[in-house]
Amino acid sequence: MTILVTGGAGFIGANFVLDWVAQSDEPVINLDLLTYAGNVQTLSSLEGNPQHVFQQGDIADSELVKRLLTEHQPRAVLNFAAESHVDRSIHGPEDFIQTNIVGTFRLLEEVRAYWKDLQGEAKDAFRFLHVSTDEVYGSLAADAPAFTEEHRYEPNSPYSASKAASDHLVRSYHHTYGLPVLTTNCSNNYGPYHFPEKLIPLMIVNALAGKPLPVYGDGQQIRDWLYVKDHCSAIRRVLEAGRTGEVYNVGGWNEKPNLEIVERICGLLDTLRPRADGQPYAGQIAYVTDRPGHDRRYAIDARKLERELGWKPAETFETGIRKTVEWYLDNWQWVENVQSGNYRDWVEKNYSGRSA
Ligand code: NAD
Ligand code: DAU
């Protein structure tokens, strides 16, 4: 038995692979293009471990995907690979169309051909699990109930539109060809190995570097935060027992405005790594021009996953955010290594044009 994971050198995929190897003997084939967001250093603890086979490559490379499927005969394919940053999709949507839509389509085509030829129990047990996002549902009014799996799709950014398209393709491969698919739509993740272009790691990294903490607009946009290892445990549970063709929302019931998140990080750093001048990190907060088309609120109703599969998150936001800040303080070398010239170019592109 083997699983094939795509995007397993990114933030969530790598956490998933590390947890998988720690908890099971089953080999994992890891296909990742190693874009700016992919980092083999995150997987360095698996070097020389025969349970993990890393293959650099594109999910849109049909020949490569076919070869990997034929060679390793996985019992499941889990698709984490994506372009994932909303701000980058605003500056340049094309990569999002290519990977999230064309890439998912090519992957589905190869998986369909592979699955069609499987026999008996191997065919029945096969699963294609697609990792998606709550952003496909659009933005919620302040008093609206959280997104259920029945909420209509209303993607607002090129990123969420490309993920919505991929979700629809996955759904159609089940409906039309009978491919045994599972889709998870998760809220905002945070935790170890999160690339510092996203809110939480960016704030930790900027705070420690004495730089401004750029809060978009009024900072009152709400996100629903889930510790990444809880997302990984939800995916394992859906893979194990989810009903094919079904969608499962994943979330931690942790709705918080961005400003509160930033202030919480500042407070933790004030205790764990006080500024040399004794001043609070919150003094570095800077309100900057808002994200175009910024979704105001996301909130996930994860009751279906709890009811049907008995999944619940293990971390509260309080325990998870403390672990996260401590992880960054303890793994500063990882942070320094990912801040390449490419990263600095992105920071310049995204933040230099935003007035305070
Ligand atoms: P990430 O950007 O950190 O990692 C993406 C990984 O995919 C990288 O390792 C990258 O090299 C790889 N990749 C990109 N294009 C590829 C291609 N064409 N072929 C093969 N590999 C490719 O993203 P993440 O935050 O880990 O998100 C993983 C998945 O989870 C995505 O599908 C994302 O939409 C979804 N998701 C993310 C969050 C979140 O809060 N980060 C929440 C819900 C769902
Ligand atoms: O909801 C799930 C989604 O969460 C995933 O599908 C995406 O892949 C993931 O990137 C994330 O999207 P967001 O846009 O919500 O995450 P981000 O960390 O970019 O921003 C979180 C909030 O913080 C959002 O309201 C924008 C705001 N923000 C972000 C940055 C980078 C700031 O105020 N300042 C910043 O510098």
Image (cartoon, rainbow, N blue to C red):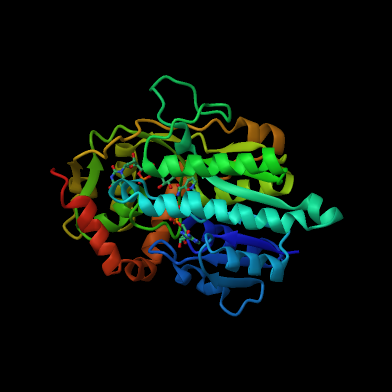
Q: Along the line of sight, which residue is nearer the eye, 93 or 262?
A: 93
Classify the position of the N terminus by image quarter.
bottom right
For ligand 2, give the image quadrant.
top left
Vertical side of 302 occupied by 234: above or below: below
Confirm whether residue 317 shows in the render. Answer: yes
Using residue 202 as the reference point, say whether residue 105 is left or right of it: right
Outermost residue to the left: 355
Vertical side of 248 occupied by 47: above or below: below
The residue at 48%/50% (across/down) is 100
Classify the position of the C terminus by image quarter.
top left
Using residue 203 as the reference point, say whether residue 195 is left or right of it: right
Among the 4 quarters of the image, the one containing residue 294: top left
**Residue 224 percent across, percent down from the top left:** 45, 37
Vertical side of 55 occupied by 249: above or below: above
Using residue 347 as the reference point, say whether residue 236 is left or right of it: right
Q: Along the line of sight, which residue is nearer the eye, 268 or 106?
A: 106
Q: Along the line of sight, which residue is nearer the eye, 314 or 225?
A: 225
Outermost residue to the bottom: 48
The residue at 46%/55% (across/down) is 99
Among the 4 quarters of the image, the one containing residue 193: bottom left
